[in-house]
Amino acid sequence: MDEVVINRLTDVTFIIPVRIDSPERARNLDLLLDHLIRHFDSTVLVMETDDRRRYHVKNNNHGIRYFFEKDPRPVFQHTRCMNLLYSKVVTPIIAGCDVDALVPPDQIRDTAAQVRRGDAVMGIAYNGRMYFTDAGLTQRYQETKNLDILTGNVNRKPIFGDLSTGGMFLVDTAKYLQAGGENEYFLGWGCEDFERVKRMEILFPQPIYFAQGGMYHMWHPRGNNSWYEDRQSEINRKKEFLKVCAMTENELKGYIKSWPWLERLQKKADYPNDL
């Protein structure tokens, strides 16, 4: 097990949207929660949306809160799931997490400091390089909880070159909610991570910060929610991304005001804490 150094980060709430579509996805969530709780004294909010509950939190740490919302749709709309969780955040910083992503704690701490000081409106907790960890490496990490297993042995060719922006981002809560939170016109996988960054670049003068060091993507089977459902879905999401990219600051502000989920985003949703 890697050395545990608790970083309080009490001003950060970690957000994890999830749909359990395989045993490996549940395992990855277990590992992510363990990683966050071992290294940070932060609140962690998990929301599962599905036709029925498939996940039960195994770590009884008081900082973890689990929520479930029934959603029978086959496509996991994690943008809506994240917005529902944002309405519960009371800390000045949000950390949005992919259930399969592990980031070294010093990179998270560094990124939080950039946002806290106001040097960045949003920070990506790695350098844009997402490294794939195969089934064997992920299992070895599960057995040892030693992050060096991933950082020292992973294939050094990033999945998407130097261009990744998903996995784990940290952002000023007030400014991000002002910017509309997640764009729910992205109904499933694809382009939403890039749109999020581009929107913040257009709206705010502060830069987007990228931490030093990579991100490590734990293995899982790639099911229906790991790529575009069909060609038309791909076209629609790419059009939405390009639409935002082409907007001026004032045009984007007007567009955000038209988003039908804004009112819901600002309300405190009454979900039971079903830990």
Image: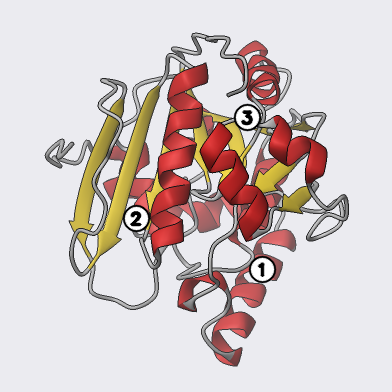
> Could you tell me if residue 105 is visible in this image?
yes
For mark 3, give the secondary structure.
Answer: loop
Q: Residues at badges 1 and 3 in contact (C-beta under 8 Å)? A: no
Circle 1: residue type: Lys
- Which residue is depicted at the point 74% across and 28% down? 206
For mark 1, give the secondary structure.
Answer: helix
Left or right of 137, for residue 9: left
Query: How far apart are labels 1 and 2 at the CA level?
Result: 19 Å
Query: How far apart are labels 1 and 3 at the CA level?
Result: 43 Å
Residue at which label 3 appears: 146
Circle 3: residue type: Asn
The quarter holding residue 136 reads bottom right
For mark 2, give the secondary structure.
Answer: loop
- Which residue is depicted at the point 77% across and 29% down? 211
Query: How far apart are labels 3 and 2 at the CA level?
Result: 41 Å
Residue at which label 2 appears: 261
**Crowding near pointer 1: few (<14 within 10 Å), some, many (20+)?**
few
Left or right of 156, for residue 219: left
- Which residue is depicted at the point 65% across and 28% down? 121
* As drawn, 231 above or below 252: below
